[in-house]
Image (cartoon, grey):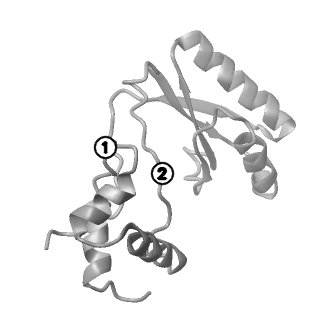
């Protein structure tokens, strides 16, 4: 991976806490850096192409949006079915993220994780049922781990200056 030059480092520092909530956030960031918006976008795209920036996305606070039943569903799926099972879950519009993790046998047989968000317990249970139906016979068992507090979600953070 290439080293960040001074401008790229300043761009990362200016955006790592989030973009300003204005109609043209990139223009405001560019103005704060004293560069043209086109140059800012060129540099951001180059950092994406180089893998320095992997993604740019919104990080919603589900609790503030009224979603109080947020659960990580964990599924025991045979290794040979993991790709098909993951595709089945990610095809559902209410799954915010889905990924594979290693099992920790004998106590933790679950290898497929999918996050759901619901406003109430009944809706959450219905979503879990829909996940189970999507997996069909690939589902060998599951649990739901409901959030009890909000954890700060952050990516890479560079130190100042």
**Image: 32 above or below 62:** below
For mark 2, give the secondary structure.
loop
Q: Residues within 10 Å of mark 1 (few under 14, many from 20)?
A: few
**Residue 116 position in % (x across, y down):** 57, 31
Q: Which mark is residue 57?
A: 2
- Quadrant location of the C terminus? bottom left
Please identify the residue farthest to the left as the structure is shown.
Answer: 161
Q: Earlier in the sequence, mark 2 or mark 1?
A: 2
Q: Residue 139 sits in which quadrant?
A: top right
Q: Residue at x 61, y 14 (%)?
A: 123
Q: Is residue 78 visible?
A: no
**Residue 99 position in % (x across, y down):** 61, 52
Q: Residue at x 70, y 44 (%)?
A: 90
* Front-lying residue, 146 or 68: 68
Q: Residue 27 sits in which quadrant?
A: bottom left
* Front-lying residue, 58 or 45: 45
Q: Name the residue carrying label 1.
A: 152
Please identify the residue farthest to the bottom as the structure is shown.
Answer: 2
Q: Using residue 53 as the reference point, say whether residue 111 is left or right of it.
A: right
Q: Using residue 98 as the reference point, say whether residue 135 is left or right of it.
A: right
**Residue 112 position in % (x across, y down):** 64, 47
Q: Is residue 109 visible?
A: yes
């Amino acid at each position: 991976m290439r080293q960040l030059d001074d401008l790229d480092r300043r761009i990362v520092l200016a955006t790592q806490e989030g973009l300003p909530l204005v109609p043209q956030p990139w223009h405001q960031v560019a103005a704060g850096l004293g560069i043209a918006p086109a140059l800012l976008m060129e540099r951001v795209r180059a950092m994406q192409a180089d893998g320095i920036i992997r993604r740019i996305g919104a990080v919603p606070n589900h609790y503030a949006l009224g979603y109080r039943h947020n659960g990580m569903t964990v599924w025991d799926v045979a290794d040979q079915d993991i790709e098909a099972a993951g595709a089945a879950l990610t095809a559902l519009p209410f799954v915010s993220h889905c990924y594979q993790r290693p099992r920790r046998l004998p106590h933790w047989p679950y290898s497929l994780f999918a996050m759901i968000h619901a406003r109430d317990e009944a809706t959450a249970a219905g979503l879990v049922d829909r996940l189970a139906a999507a997996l069909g016979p690939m589902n060998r068992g599951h649990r739901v781990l409901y959030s009890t507090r909000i954890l700060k979600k952050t990516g890479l953070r560079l130190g100042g200056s």
